[in-house]
Amino acid sequence: MGSAVLTFFILLAFALSLVGYVREDLNDERQTFQRDWGRVMDIVWASETRVRIGAAGVETASKRAGGGDAGDVRTFEAQGGRLAFPAGPDSSGSLVLQLSREGGGSGEEIGRFLAIAKGTAGSGGNLVKTMNDAVGLRWGLGGYLVTPSASTVAISPLPDLANPQVQAVIADTARLSGYYAAGLADLAPRTAARRGGTRELRWLRPQIDPLSGKSLLRILSPVSVNGRPFGVVAGQISPDRLLERLDPGTFSGAYWILDEGSEPVTSSASGQLNPSAKAYVTAHCRAPGASAHGVADTFHDGGLLICAPLGQTSWTLVYSLPGRVIASRVAGEIAGPAIVTGLAVLLLWVFVLLFNRKILVPLFERSERVFDSEHLSRTLIETAPVGLALVNANNRTVLLESAHMQALDRRVATGGAAPIGDVLMQQAPAVFQASRDRATMTSDVELRLPTVEGATIDIAAKLTPSYYQGQPVIVAALSDVTAERQLARQLTAARTAADSANAAKSAFLASMSHEIRTPLNAILGHLELLERLPQAAPVAARVRTVASSSRALLQIINDILEFSKVEAGEITIDSIRFDAAELVRETMAMFMPLSQRKGLTLTCAIDAALPRYYIGDPGRIRQILVNLLGNAIKFTERGSVSIDVGSGEGNAMPPLVIRVMDTGIGIPAEHQARVFDAFDQVDVSITRRYGGTGLGLALCKRMVEAMGGAIDVDSREGHGSTFSVTLPLLPGDDAVSERDIEPQTADEGTDTRGIHLLVAEDDEVNRELIRDQLDALGYTSDIVENGLVALSKFNERHYDLVLSDLGMPVMDGYTFARCVRNQGSRTPILAITADVTAADSQRFRESGMSGVLLKPMSLASIESAVRRYLRLAADPKAAAAVDNPAEGLAASLPDRLRITLERQTTASLEELTAAMAQGDWENVSSRVHSIKGGFAMLHMGDVVEACVRLETLLAGEPDAAAGEMQQALAELKQRLSSALEKIAGAKEARDSMHPAQSNTTTTLDP
């Protein structure tokens, strides 16, 4: 207690010294402010004095000027109210302007005004120069004399009339009138109030001088002749001059000069004074009873705020010193006392603690040690929510037990004290021995004991050796865990049942996949072959309808089976290198015809800084994109669908972010939380109008989460939706591995006619279909019904590639592949199957298969797989369409849309040219935007770039950049001409090009 009191007084003394230091520092700041305020007031008084001298000189000169020089009056009127007096030895020159004919005064008044401006009135003939010297304050910024109505002004010194900018300003009389009329209305009552007193002045806050272009403040003084207002003398100075005499090295804060509205006129710092500080200035420095020389200060926002009015200017000088500056300065001054105080307190408490530790603590420990063991044991036993007991380690009798332990004894059929000890001894003899050996160990024991009711209970016991009253004991904590163990057994049984059900579900899915897709494969394959045959228009239309419906059925089946695999935890995620930008462009090309049929604009924007390669599962990402793009186009009737690909926020490895945006029907806010639920749509009308199973988005969400990413939606009903997919993928290096060899590394003229394939398929319909497909592609083949026959054929001759079904009689595909690999052959073997589970993928790798072709197999997927695994070149024309999206889209553009594009482009160019000639920039902007949108859909970047340049010029000053606008228009016309020629050329080659293909093969890692 005494040490605490002593510490308190030491700290109190330090606090008092700290307060003294702070007060001394603040007093220094107040004295500095008084000194600086006096310096500013010196400039204010000098400025006002010189303006008053100038005003008095003008009044004296006006009395002597008489009617002025009639010749000057005629010249002034002949020049349209403008007369310049050049500078001379005794005159700095001036310019007299008539800003308005209203209130211009009589000819005599104008003559007198001109005489004063010229400097011929009064003695010496240099009155204007004298006035300018008075109001110029030695800084050469000049002044002016203006009539009360602001109709005529004399400006000195004479401006540079040869400067085009000065001429333009002089011609703008409205702007000049607004500048020189400022403050005149407030001076009318002051003119009358001056009688018998000091001439009142009016200070105006800084404003841009039209002639010099500088921000200047003005001091106005009224001029009267014979009791009538004659004009106003104004002196102009830079606002920075008011603070020029302040030495920045003598103060640590910042000065502001505020006008009567508490707005800054000038300051010594670049920051702004906060509103609460301005309110304090208004309340304490401009209050009705505030003295003109009074100084007010306060602590504001942790700092010091001092203010004082600047004489009769209605302005206030404000000084702000931040609290951190005060703290840093005071900290430097009190560092020594603080160290001394800290050392004193430290030494005091070191002494107290050492005394307490060496003397007091041992005394208390010796006095309390006797009671600790007994008190601790009884407290634990009585308050613990489990059965606690102290068991003698020698004779196994219970020395102490809690109420919970007594209740447990009554339930157990053995009863008594010794049997519990015997049971514990049987279950954990090592603990009893450790207690007798004074060793430390803890043992957990599970007991299953009979009860008096004939049932059994589960007991969890924790045994720890200890000592009590000099005897070795066992501290036993027993808990009834019967309910927990029963629940665990039920959960185990439920898990076993769920695993069995899941296994049955997986087997059912595998069977359904094969049984459904096998006949569907035959249907789609034959329909694809039928589409290649010449047919009458009605028949061809029906074939296309059946094929489209079959593909839709396949998509529904695929979604259901894929979702079931995800729910069963059998989804697999590959980690291979892929070109993210190319994957997005290929997926977009798949939907281009559909978007064109609906009249939608489909665009893609890929961040140029995006890494080219990523490590991930391109198949899953493509599947997600297909679902999102399909939904966007399906639910959008007009407008556009766009894809944006870029990097998200991240320090070391920013994720890949893909956004799909549309202008469709949108999603109500109350339904957005369940758009990713399986078999669920916003409302039943969506299903009736657009169809669908409600599985697409649910499948996307689960695949994205399986890749460690996230998907979210931002939508407004009636305005469209934005789906954002964020995937934490690692960038892949640009080195080319064997797996990533591009098709163009081979000779583009590679002939595929000599390729011979071996096919093993047990279904007769599928065998015939595959034979027709391979014949249509120009490949020769041997097709057999099982793996054993295929192995025999394989040993008879050379095959370039093998396609094998998996579930075949006699010998399945896995056994066939292992036999081929055991012979040392490296011929590519592709599995053809309707579904792939995680277990299947593992078996593919173990059997030595190279990859998988999913049923139903299209001609494009077969050809792509053959060329990929045999390292052949892709079709040159199809490759060109993929490599150059603009040419590929142009080649697929229907004739009707191509003609419409040409017609609309020509019309837009004509309207654009006419609007530019008329200066109708709004219409020009509309036409440019229309052209840019149309050609952006076709990925024609040259045209888009030219449109962007025009839009940039339109955003600035198009009237001032007429030459650049014409050049940009000429460049746009040239690029449009080239683009239309490219589209026309693509039309001629369209029939010979292959459509963009999507690779449906999956490479298996060895």
Image (spheres, helix red, strand yellow):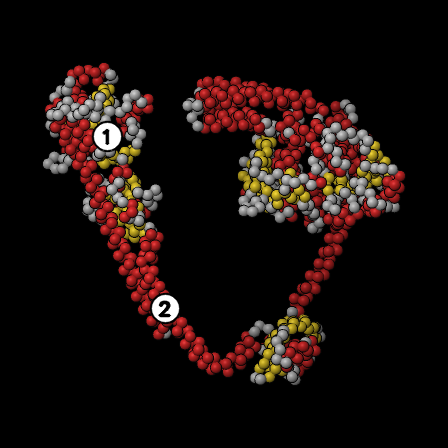
Secondary structure beneath disc 1? loop
Say whether residue 324 is visible: yes
Q: Nearer the viewer, residue 356 or 984?
A: 356
Relative placement, left or right, of 630 versus 382 is: right
Q: Provide the residue designation for mark 2.
A: 345
Labels 1 & 2 near each other (Cβ < 8 A): no
Tell me if mark 1 has few (under 14), some (14-19) or many (20+) residues whose alpha carbon lies within 10 angstroms of its own. Answer: many
Q: CA distance from mark 1 to mark 2?
A: 68 Å
Relative placement, left or right, of 936 versus 768 is: left
Question: Which of the numbered marks, if any, corresponds to residue 745?
Answer: none
Tell me if mark 2 has few (under 14), some (14-19) or many (20+) residues whose alpha carbon lies within 10 angstroms of its own. Answer: some
The answer to which quarter of the image holds residue 222 is top left
Q: Provide the residue designation for mark 1.
A: 142
The type of residue carrying mark 1 is: Gly
Q: Nearer the viewer, residue 465 or 83?
A: 83
Mark sitting earlier along the chain (1/2): 1
The type of residue carrying mark 2 is: Val
